[in-house]
Amino acid sequence: MKIGFIGIGIMGRPMAKNLLKAGYDLVVYDKVAKLDDVVAAGAKAGASNKDVAAQCEVVITMLPNSPHVKEAVLGENGVLEGAKPGTILVDMSSIAPGAAQEICKAAAEKGVVMLDAPVSGGEPKAIDGTLAVMVGGDAAAFDTVKPILEKMGSSVVRVGESGAGNVTKLANQIVVALNIAAVSEALVLATKAGVDPEAVFDAIKGGLAGSTVMNAKVPMMLARNFAPGFRIELHVKDLQNALDTAHALHVAVPLTASVMETMQAVTLDGHSTSDHSALVRYYEKLAQVEVRKQPA
Ligand code: NAD
């Protein structure tokens, strides 16, 4: 089965490489990013989104947000211009659920089945093929592509119809954002109170407060390593999609709204392209301390 992979960024690059490792025949394309290493690993470079779709039975997209997926799929020289009826489009980007449903509908008019299949786990899990994949859309198409998704993720779950994958991802992003905020606030307090934040981390990570987010992000904070990973600007995008989705349903999401404001402040401070663990800087500024590894 020939697979197209569009969007060779922080996540798409290692995900595409895992499909190559698994022996799939891959055609790749990115509007901007270099493809050399993916081609060296065995992929063929496509000339456009349309060209990729024309060559493949399954097309995967891994792009920043709804407008990028709309452009790549519905736009000029886009996937739907090249795709044959029966093609399965798997959008693994995190986008607005409403946009996913809109694109799914447009795809269906061309005989293309679209699944929304966003992921959680970040770059490390993209590299080792252990992402969590949450899928919305047609059950038969899901069964067809599940073995492919399992080469990129250790958990692949169909959560409902079109858009449900992205609703699930918004839930995920709310939990991750609030977790980073809580960890930040807690470690800033410990630091200001004169207790080594690394010792606090070591003491509490095995208890009820421990989390995957804590284990991934606290070492970055302690090392003052805010290289992305997952950029603040992408988390702002996800929280905006969460707020829009919630408000369209008149659901109040006060905690999400609050952490969104803190992300605006770190954005204004020039950290939009830092990893989202840089949210700790907001709390540090309030308390005038830095959460960092103490000298031995
Ligand atoms: P990225 O910006 O590194 O990569 C996106 C790629 O898409 C870029 O290389 C860009 O050139 C390309 N692109 C944009 N528009 C295009 C178009 N029209 N046609 C072809 N290529 C196009 O982003 P990323 O970090 O890889 O994230 C991708 C998606 O995965 C986002 O929705 C993000 O929210 C989600 N995500 C990211 C992480 C993470 O840790 N980075 C984790 C989980 C989910």
Image (cartoon, rainbow, N blue to C red):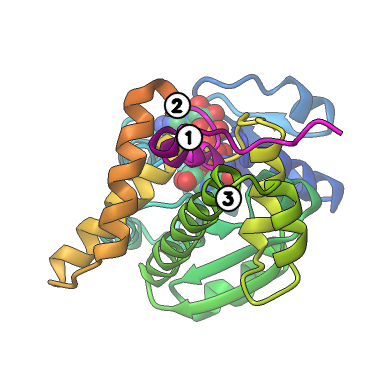
Which residue occupies 48% across, 27% down? 273
Amino acid type at circle 1 is Arg
Q: Nearer the viewer, mark 3 or mark 2?
A: 3
Is the residue under label 1 in contact with that under label 2 (CB below 8 Å)? yes
Whole-angstrom CA distance, mark 3 to mark 1, is 11 Å
Q: What residue does disc 2 label? A: 271
Q: Which mark is residue 281?
A: 1
Q: Which residues are magenta?
A: 273-296
Image x and y of residue 75, in percent: 31, 35
Image x and y of residue 282, in percent: 41, 37
Whole-angstrom CA distance, mark 2 to mark 1, is 9 Å
Against 123, residue 7 (above or below) is above
Is the residue under label 1 in contact with that under label 3 (CB below 8 Å)? no
Which residue occupies 65% across, 30% down? 224
Foreground of the two, 241 or 279? 279
Q: Earlier in the sequence, mark 3 or mark 2?
A: 3
On whether residue 288 falls in the magenta region, the answer is yes
Q: Earlier in the sequence, mark 2 or mark 1?
A: 2
